[in-house]
Image (cartoon, rainbow, N blue to C red):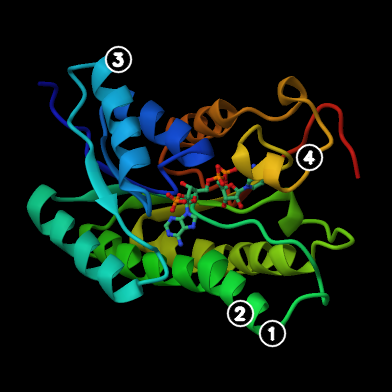
Amino acid sequence: MEKSKGLAIITGASQGIGAAVAVGLAHDGYRAVLIARSRPNLEKVRDEIMKSNSCTPEPIVLPLDITDSAKVDYEVRSINRKYGAVDILVNAAAAFADGSLSESVDYFRNVVETNLVAQYAVLKTVTEIMKAQAGGYIFNIASRAAKYGFSGGGIYGSTKFGLVGLTESLYRELAPSGIRITSLCPGWVNTEMAKKAGTPLPDEEMIQPDDLLRTIRYLLNLSENVCIKEIILEMKKSII
Ligand SMILES: NC(=O)c1ccc[n+]([C@@H]2O[C@H](COP(=O)([O-])OP(=O)(O)OC[C@H]3O[C@@H](n4cnc5c(N)ncnc54)[C@H](OP(=O)(O)O)[C@@H]3O)[C@@H](O)[C@H]2O)c1
């Protein structure tokens, strides 16, 4: 069994971008903490990690709804006590939502709960842990929809603009504690979410989930003196 490089917590790890990042970081030697609601899908990702590299530290499957902030706080702190430092947090869990003003206020509130309030709660817990250990790296998966407004995309976009806004402040606040934080803002990524959202691009023309993993690896490989607060990943065949 390989010695763990540390803990990497990945929300949204049951599929898509989160799963690709979890598999990659696990192969790099991190003990991946896999968070999403679907236990069977998380177990599939865990099995994929263990099957392709038996030397990888065994991932931790943590089925959680991230909107249950008290439970997330309890579970993350328990894992920190048991396994030690939290080196990486990847906030990838989110839900797509259509519409700008067409939907009810309750619908809007639910999307904000999942895509922004829940991230806020995860960040509160994890930054407290990272401050105590004086280091760590946080990746917030925002979106190109956090940089441009799209017709009919106001609800989703406002949560992603909010996440980038929060990251912008945290980037300045956390640096003195040795914690780095970066927003990743991709265009269409080849996942279930893109299909659900009606991407006009064929699979092969979208950004691939592994491109997010490679971006994270690139950021982790920079010297600790460098902070990059935001990366926008455009598609080569850019469409507005
Ligand atoms: N795909 C794109 O085109 C695109 C572009 C830009 C940004 N993004 C962003 O990239 C991130 C990952 O998206 P993706 O494309 O990989 O989407 P995806 O395939 O739909 O995956 C979303 C993940 O979030 C989890 N999740 C959703 N709600 C949750 C909740 N309440 N509690 C816990 N986990 C929850 C899902 O798992 P469960 O259902 O098992 O809970 C799943 O693992 C998201 O933040 C998304 O907004 C995506």
Task: Using the numbered discs, state the Cα–Cα distance from disc 4 to disc 2 in whole angstroms.
Answer: 25 Å
Q: Is residue 28 visible?
A: no
Q: Residue under circle 1?
A: 105
Tell me what residue is drawn at x 62 percent, y 54 percent.
Answer: 142
Q: Is mark 1 within 8 Å of ligand 1?
A: no
Q: Are marks 1 and 4 in contact (CB under 8 Å)?
A: no
Q: Quadrant of the C terminus?
A: top right
Mark 4 or mark 2: whose residue is earlier in sequence: 2
Q: CA distance from mark 2 to mark 1?
A: 6 Å
Question: Label 2: which residue?
Answer: 109
Q: Nearer the viewer, mark 3 or mark 4?
A: 4
At label 1, the amino acid type is Val
- Disc tally is 4
Where in the figure is residue 43, as x and y percent of width and height?
28, 36
In this rendering, the answer to whether 135 lies above or below 58 is below
- Residue position marked by numbered label 3 in the rendering: 52
Q: Earlier in the sequence, mark 3 or mark 4?
A: 3
Q: Is residue 55 above or below residue 76?
A: above
Q: Confirm or reject: label 4 Cβ below 8 Å from ligand 1.
A: yes
For image coordinates 67% across by 51% down, the residue present is 143
The quadrant holding residue 200 is: top right
Q: Which residue is mark 4?
A: 199
Mark 3, Cα crowd under 10 Å, few <14 / some 14-19 / many 20+, is: few
